[in-house]
Amino acid sequence: MKEDNIRNDISEKLITREELNSKVKELAARINNDYKGKKPVMVSILKGSIVFLSELMKHITIESSIDFIAVSSYQGGTQSTGIVKMIMDLRESIEGRNVLLVEDIVDTGLTVAYLRDNLKTRRPASLKLCTLLNKPANMEIDIKMDYLGFKIPDKFVVGYGLDYQEKYRNLPFIGTLKPEIYRKKIK
Ligand code: IMP
Ligand code: MG
């Protein structure tokens, strides 16, 4: 029987654990500086951004809080359906707060645009975006990425919170899947 190790499904490591660690520290340092005295609420977009948020917040030294919001646009495939659904809303009010949206990846931009428009109606003092990854090739909407980790090529990636059909989120690096993993799905 084949060994049960999800790393066997990875064809290419795109971003290593070390590169992720140092980028996260760099972003946190900028946030610490920009949000001094502003008590930001960092809003993690579930589920993909939980690893990024938890790594990032360890390096945040200013007073801050976290909250969660869940949306879905993929429904299990590797292409955005274009329809964004709110699955779970924030616990706290963001009126008058400095909100920093924390996302794993901006692909078409539809998810973040939807959330940006939705959250703006709640009158936050400010609303900014921190995303670990961006695929510039797929952007359909103009999105301001105030804090961006890495621009990546137009490849479907997994790990560090990102999934393929709910798998691979626990990989400590960002990688691409072997083509036969997708083929299995089509059969
Ligand atoms: P957008 O709405 O097209 O920008 O897509 C954003 C969401 O799609 C992200 O929050 C991810 O959950 C998911 N997504 C986009 N690209 C990838 C990828 O390469 N791997 C895993 N999930 C992705
Ligand atoms: Mg996501």
Image: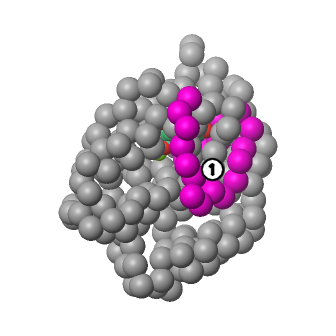
* Amino acid tagged 1: Leu
| Residue at the image position 64 percent from the left and 20 percent from the top | 183
Q: Is residue 159 visible?
A: no
What percent of the width, then of the height, locates residue 136? 68, 38
| Residue at the image position 74 percent from the left and 54 percent from the top | 15
- Please indicate whether residue 168 sits to the left or right of residue 66 in the image: right
Q: Nearer the viewer, residue 100 or 168?
A: 100
What percent of the width, then of the height, locates residue 48? 48, 50
What percent of the width, then of the height, locates residue 90? 25, 56
**Label 1 near ligand 1 (CB < 8 Å):** yes
Q: Nearer the viewer, residue 36 or 75?
A: 36
Under circle 1, the secondary element is: strand
Looking at the image, residue 172 lies above or below residue 142 = below
- Please indicate whether residue 45 sits to the left or right of residue 124 in the image: right
- Please indicate whether residue 94 sits to the left or right of residue 140 in the image: left
| Mark 1 Cα-neighbour bin, 10 Å: few <14, some 14–19, many ≥20 | some
Looking at the image, residue 144 lies above or below residue 51 = above
Considering the whole magenta stretch, tell me its main secondary structure: loop
Q: Is residue 70 visible?
A: yes
Q: Quadrant of the C terminus?
A: top right
User: Over which residues does the magenta segment extend?
Assistant: 140-163
Q: Which residue is mark 1?
A: 133
Res 63 quadrant in image? bottom left
Q: Nearer the viewer, residue 149 or 77?
A: 149
| Residue at the image position 72 percent from the left and 44 percent from the top | 152
